[in-house]
Image: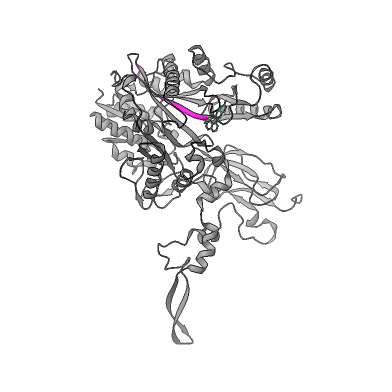
Amino acid sequence: MFAKILIANRGEIAIRVARACRELGIASVAVYSEADRDALHVKAADEAYLLGPATPAESYLNVAKILEVVRESGAEAVHPGYGFLAENAAFARALEEAGITFIGPPASAIDAMGSKTRARELMQAAGVPIVPGTTEPVATAEDALAIIKADIGFPVAVKAAGGGGGKGFRVALTEDELPGAFEGAAREGEKFFSDATVYLERYLPDPRHVEVQILADKHGNVIHLGERDCSIQRRHQKVIEESPGPLVDDAMRERIGKIGVDAAKAVDYVGAGTIEGLLSSETGEYFFLEMNTRVQVEHCVTEMVTGIDIVKEGIRAAAGHELSYAQDDVVLRGHAIECRINAEDAARNFAPAPGRIGHYKEPTGPGVRVDSGVEAGGEVTPLYDPMVAKLIVWDADREQATQRMLRALAEYEIGGLKTLLPFHDALLRTEQWARGETCRDLMEDKGWLKQLAFPKAPKASADDAQDAPTVEQAYTVEVSGRRFDVKVIGPAFGGAGTPNGSAPAGAATAAKPRRGERKSSGAGGVGGADLLEAPLQGNMWKVLVEQGQAVEEGQLICIIEAMKMENEITAHKAGVVAELMVKEGEAIASGAPIARITAAVPAAE
Ligand code: MV4
């Protein structure tokens, strides 16, 4: 076994790996950026090294610097966690060449699965079912139309070959939508993966995202640990995961498990990996989508129902050990659910909500597991993933696990910033969740989400005005040299004397002007009321309007990418874009002007 492992990651997954190392008697080395000097993952490891400045490129993605720390620390192996360098074949190769073990599959397997067209070709050859479509890249929208008419039919999914996880994914329901979908997928592929190549798949209506957990060793043993259902997603980001899948019975588990094992064997996989696929709820067909060649965020639900430590098995496999389990040893017991606790505001389109964590208390008790990367006083920066913790519960069945999750969510106290805690609470109380549906309608419905985050806002302001407790405040005032004692009696809102120091949610939201919304108007038409400002810091990913264009209130103006999320910025009023102050690709500060929207067509200068 390794004596020392370097963990090339941060946050909850770095802590998860450090814990596995401790249990295996392996020394752990943390690395950190300047922004993470006081981070929890630094304390979780036996030693820690500074990589560099806060930006990922200068720290957690800095291969040269990480290799230097590997040498300096004397680590024999590197665990990449997920994200950052986890699926970077060049990094795996660089370690291999330096005689260091990469805790993951061989670089060739990362490469094979990295190109989605190549992966589809390989899977087809291995007898793994893929969504009907092309395995060859499609050059133009005209070529695509010919293939669709001959083979696939509409609706069709257009996907970037370098993509994955929903980036570069477009749908064309009809022929009219094909050129836009094709260009969109190609453009996004170029932007994110420097590869404009796209391929086509038949679009499946409302499928379930079902994935298979794989473990493989260097002796040719490959097993599966059953499935996870991750159908509850928002903009291709998973929000809630569970195991077993609500629609999967033993026979189906055996069928899709075998598909997963065949897929892993086809690329000589080693370690922990996941086959992602789509399960048609209509026909029960299961199709390979892609393979994630790393440990995943949601591995915990599988650990809870199988009792198998996936991270420890991955480390043991990398060290050349045989798997501790045969397929027959794997039994799924009970039901596990995971809620991702992101620092996001569900009411504001899931906008990132970075900040300093104030009060902090994690839930405990029977069947509850919290994998978190934060503590009281810790800073959540917009530079990294918004997921601050994962709340995982186990119970005998889905219904009881849901009740246990609601209990644990209620026990979880996170002060100082907005999180998805109230969102999860509301979602798990819906009929759709109880029936085991995909909740696609709920995830897309903006009105429902708004209601979620401010459940009592309109009612509270009306009720509280009547029933609010009153406070008395005594002042001494001086008028013309004479002193008087005065008492002021009024409602407890907003002033001193509110029980917990903050105004009720309804009153506070109503009173506080938010960025990007109308502000007090200056003189003339060029005042603050015209200005649309960036509600958060990030990167200008897409600008959808041009100067001089007429816009409706609520129309999409641009998309800012921050903390790995796309944030839609909409027009705060109807009018004309008199001035556009932003460009695609540039960094944007919080509060920076985006556009000036005036009521009338701007006069010629
Ligand atoms: C699809 C699809 C329908 N048909 N592909 C790709 C990335 C992943 N995050 C979701 N992806 C989808 N690919 C074809 N051919 C529908 C989705 C999809 C989805 C699938 C299952 C559960 C939730 C989903 C949410 C959005 C899109």
Residue at image coords 51%, 42%: 431
**Figure check: 179 above or below 125:** below
Q: Nearer the viewer, residue 211 or 551?
A: 211
219 lies left or right of 229? left
Q: Spot the residue most to the left.
A: 25
Does 211 lie within the magenta span? yes
Q: Nearer the viewer, residue 149 or 103?
A: 149
**Figure check: 269 above or below 442:** above
Query: Across the whole image, how many numbered discs are drawn on residues?
Result: 0
601 lies left or right of 480? right
Q: Nearer the viewer, residue 463 or 517?
A: 463
Residue at image coords 25%, 31%: 23
Task: Residue 109: name its quadrant.
Answer: top left
Does 318 lie within the magenta span? no
x and y, in percent, of residue 349 in the image: 55, 45
x and y, in percent, of residue 192 in the image: 54, 30
Residue 9 in view in this figure:
no
339 lies left or right of 512? left
Quadrant observed for ligand 1 in the rendered image: top right
Residue 245 in view in this figure:
yes
Q: Main secondary structure of the magenta part?
A: strand
Q: Spot the residue most to the top.
A: 125
Residue at image coords 33%, 18%: 217
Q: Nearer the viewer, residue 380 or 175?
A: 175
Q: Quadrant of the N terminus?
A: top left
**Figure check: 188 above or below 376:** above
x and y, in percent, of residue 26 in the image: 25, 29
Q: Which residues are magenta?
A: 208-221
x and y, in percent, of residue 236 in the image: 52, 34
Colouring scheme applied when the structure was drawn: one colour
